[in-house]
């Protein structure tokens, strides 16, 4: 028997007898925290005793009963806090019983049994406080987590090798007869064989629950430790011709080639990290800037009069999941229902019509996205900046992944595929593009259109020796005019950015544009120079980000889409990269790139059937923003300062409010201009003006009074 009976409160019988009955009807919002504390006290005193670990509580639900071990009961008390705080009875369906407890299953439980049940009725602050009250109980669990932690050893592997011949063969994997292009794939197959033995239900292994939960061990790094190191990227779009045959456990680095390659990839990772993270930061800034003014309608019950809807094919469960809590109809004139991803699996395979922020008539009028178009997730995000949330959810995944240099050491470097004429004229060496040595280029012309040039933006760049990729310009394509007069557009198959070198930029500044507003050069002038540079890409990292960037920030790409197809492509690109967030966030981002068909400074009237529209690139949406405050923060500042449309701007952004004389007038829903003339309808932003004459007179007056 444990010694401190007074600390066990409701569960003294459990300590005395090893079993106890508990009715869930007796658990209330007022006493459940004390119940949890009593259980924690028992575990603090006896978690190292097998007798205590086997304590059982028979739980009587209103509709059933069940025996739970003390650890299982502790987890359920933690989660049942959310049930009783909302005034509901704990039923058997509320049982929290997971083989492996991860942050995902905890989130799913909270979403299902608490957030969705209470988000419309419970005060937002109380909703968050109760979630914190639930997961805050992890702090008590932390007191004895060292007893529950796992250790790593090789004894389990030795036992498995002696018992299972296939396991032994996997740890002595031989790549001598395997073609080099298949080494990585075959190594992963062998690693999966090891994992299948490690995670067997009838056996125990020190890595078992790390693999089951997907936490703590990276399978590809485990391959290098246990199976083989294999091929490594050379930083030039391929891999070193010398694969490292051993694993770090079995042989490690043995030859000079092994050591050189293993050392070299560290530097390659640093180069890739510097380039990729810089791009991600610039992309994140632009996304946030273009979407920071998105907001919800102030009235949750208001439904806009939009008659234009997004057409979405529910291809699989992933698409179904990201449209959870959204309003849909099976035809444009049908009844709208709220989608519940846990119940509506019959919708997979169907094409549905969704109310969407992209076509919300209320948002287009400047009154904010109505809750019907945003979906019930609005009740969760209503006190936040929904545009900034959408931008952060997307860009933070790119940035966080690209910050991790360990992922860059995978031999999955992409080799860029170009249009055919490129290979006839140009040569790629690492990230530099130049001309082939054995050709005559005298009558060839290089043409770069001014409208295709995009200014690259990297923040906080303090490296004086930075490359043109960090401070310069880039295009998605350029033109070569052949001696016979025909022209060929040169680009990659995925429309990747092609950066202009300093030599090329200096020549552009010297010659200026021609009458057709483009730069034209003799290709022979670049015989001894690099013309362009490209980014070395990793298939698992920057590829997805660049696909997304090219989709929403590339004129040639956007021309191929309407609002339905670009949304579908946007979602597919992110899902392929493992980014699975509610589709409404994607739609908010795209919403701010849609303008009226006949006037780029107006938004479409979605209350009209089949309303025409145009989709802008992300950069164009910034430079053509309806707020001068946002325009002045866009990359093309020089163009913004002299743009003719500045005099028509009247919209106030969140940034403008800090410099306005009377921001409450713009923020107020009831503010209206007294007259209907154009000039009076423009809510001109009046900046705060410091009246120095008034301040001087005031100071003199105060000084006189003080005398």
Image (cartoon, helix red, strand yellow):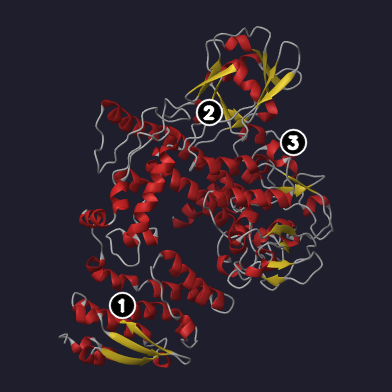
Give the Cα distance between marks 2 and 3: 35 Å
Q: Name the front one of labels 2 and 1.
A: 1
Q: Which mark is residue 534?
A: 2
Mark 1 = which residue?
A: 71
Residue closer to the observer: 144 or 101? 101
Quadrant for the N terminus, please: bottom left
Give the Cα distance between marks 3 and 1: 69 Å
Q: Earlier in the sequence, mark 2 or mark 1?
A: 1
Residue closer to the observer: 29 or 421? 421
Give the Cα distance between marks 2 and 1: 55 Å
Q: Earlier in the sequence, mark 3 or mark 1?
A: 1
Quadrant of res 311: bottom right
Q: Callout 1: 10 Å neighbours few (<14), some, many (20+)? A: some
Q: Earlier in the sequence, mark 2 or mark 3?
A: 2
Image position of 326 with respect to 172: above or below: below
On screen, residue 310 versus residue 611, left or right, reads left
Tell me residue 90's x, y (percent).
Answer: 46, 86
């Amino acid at each position: 028997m444990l010694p401190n009976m007074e600390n066990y409160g409701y569960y003294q019988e459990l300590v005395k007898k090893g079993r106890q009955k508990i009715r869930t009807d007796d658990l209330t919002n007022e006493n459940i925290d004390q119940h949890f504390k009593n259980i924690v006290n028992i575990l603090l005193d006896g978690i190292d005793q097998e007798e205590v670990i086997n304590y059982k509580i028979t739980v009587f639900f209103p509709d059933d009963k069940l025996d739970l071990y003390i650890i299982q009961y502790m987890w359920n008390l933690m989660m049942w806090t959310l049930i009783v705080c909302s005034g509901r009875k704990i039923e058997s369906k509320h049982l929290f019983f997971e083989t492996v407890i991860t942050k995902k299953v905890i989130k799913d439980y909270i979403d299902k049994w608490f957030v969705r049940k209470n988000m419309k009725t419970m005060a937002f602050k109380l909703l968050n406080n109760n979630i914190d009250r639930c997961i805050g109980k992890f702090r008590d669990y932390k007191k004895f987590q060292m007893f529950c932690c796992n250790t790593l050893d090789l004894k389990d592997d030795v036992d498995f090798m002696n018992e299972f011949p296939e396991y032994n063969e996997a740890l002595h994997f031989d790549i001598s007869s395997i073609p080099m292009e298949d080494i990585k794939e075959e190594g992963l197959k062998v690693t999966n064989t090891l994992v299948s033995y490690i995670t067997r239900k009838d056996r125990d292994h020190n890595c078992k629950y790390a693999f089951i939960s997907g936490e703590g061990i990276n399978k590809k790094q485990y391959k290098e430790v246990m199976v083989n190191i294999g091929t490594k990227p050379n930083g030039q779009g391929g891999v070193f011709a010398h694969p490292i045959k051993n694993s770090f456990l079995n042989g490690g680095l043995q030859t000079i080639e092994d050591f050189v390659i293993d050392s070299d990839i560290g530097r390659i990772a640093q180069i890739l990290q510097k380039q990729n993270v810089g791009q991600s930061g610039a992309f994140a800034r632009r996304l946030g800037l273009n979407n920071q003014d998105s907001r919800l309608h102030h009235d949750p019950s208001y439904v806009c009069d939009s008659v234009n809807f997004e057409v979405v094919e529910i291809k699989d469960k992933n698409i179904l999941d990201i449209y959870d809590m959204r309003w849909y109809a099976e035809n444009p004139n049908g009844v709208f229902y709220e989608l519940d991803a846990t119940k509506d699996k019959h919708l997979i395979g169907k094409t549905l019509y969704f109310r969407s922020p992209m076509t919300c008539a209320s948002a287009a009028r400047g009154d904010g996205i109505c809750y019907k178009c945003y979906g019930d997730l609005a009740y969760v995000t209503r006190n936040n900046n929904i545009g900034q949330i959408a931008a952060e959810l997307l860009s933070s995944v790119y940035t966080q992944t690209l910050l991790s240099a360990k992922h860059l050491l995978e031999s999955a470097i992409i080799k860029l595929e170009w249009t055919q004429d490129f290979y006839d004229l140009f040569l790629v060496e690492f990230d530099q593009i130049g001309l082939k040595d054995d050709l005559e280029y005298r009558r060839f012309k290089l043409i770069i259109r001014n409208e295709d040039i995009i200014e690259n933006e990297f923040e906080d760049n303090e490296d004086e020796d930075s490359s043109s990729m960090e401070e310069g310009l880039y295009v998605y394509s350029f033109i070569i005019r052949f001696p016979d007069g025909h022209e060929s557009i040169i680009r990659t198959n995925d429309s990747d950015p092609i950066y202009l070198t300093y030599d090329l930029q200096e020549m552009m500044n010297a010659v200026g544009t021609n009458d057709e507003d483009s730069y034209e050069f003799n290709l022979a002038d670049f015989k001894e120079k690099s013309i362009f540079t490209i980014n070395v890409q990793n298939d698992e990292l920057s590829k997805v980000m660049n696909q997304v960037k090219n989709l929403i920030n590339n004129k040639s790409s956007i021309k191929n889409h309407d609002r339905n197809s670009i949304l579908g492509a946007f979602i597919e690109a992110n899902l392929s990269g493992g980014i699975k967030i509610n589709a409404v966030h994607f739609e908010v981002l795209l919403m701010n790139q849609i303008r009226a068909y006949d006037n780029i400074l107006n938004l479409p009237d979605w209350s009209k059937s089949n309303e025409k529209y145009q989709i802008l690139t992300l950069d164009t949406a910034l430079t053509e923003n309806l707020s001068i405050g946002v325009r002045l923060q866009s990359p093309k500042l020089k163009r913004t300062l002299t743009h003719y449309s500045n005099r028509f701007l009247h919209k106030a952004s969140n940034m403008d409010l800090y410099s306005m004389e009377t921001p409450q007038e713009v923020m107020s829903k009831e503010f209206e201009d007294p007259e209907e003339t154009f000039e009076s309808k423009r809510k001109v932003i009046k900046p705060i003006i410091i009246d120095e004459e008034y301040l001087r007179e005031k100071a003199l007056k105060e000084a006189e009074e003080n005398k």
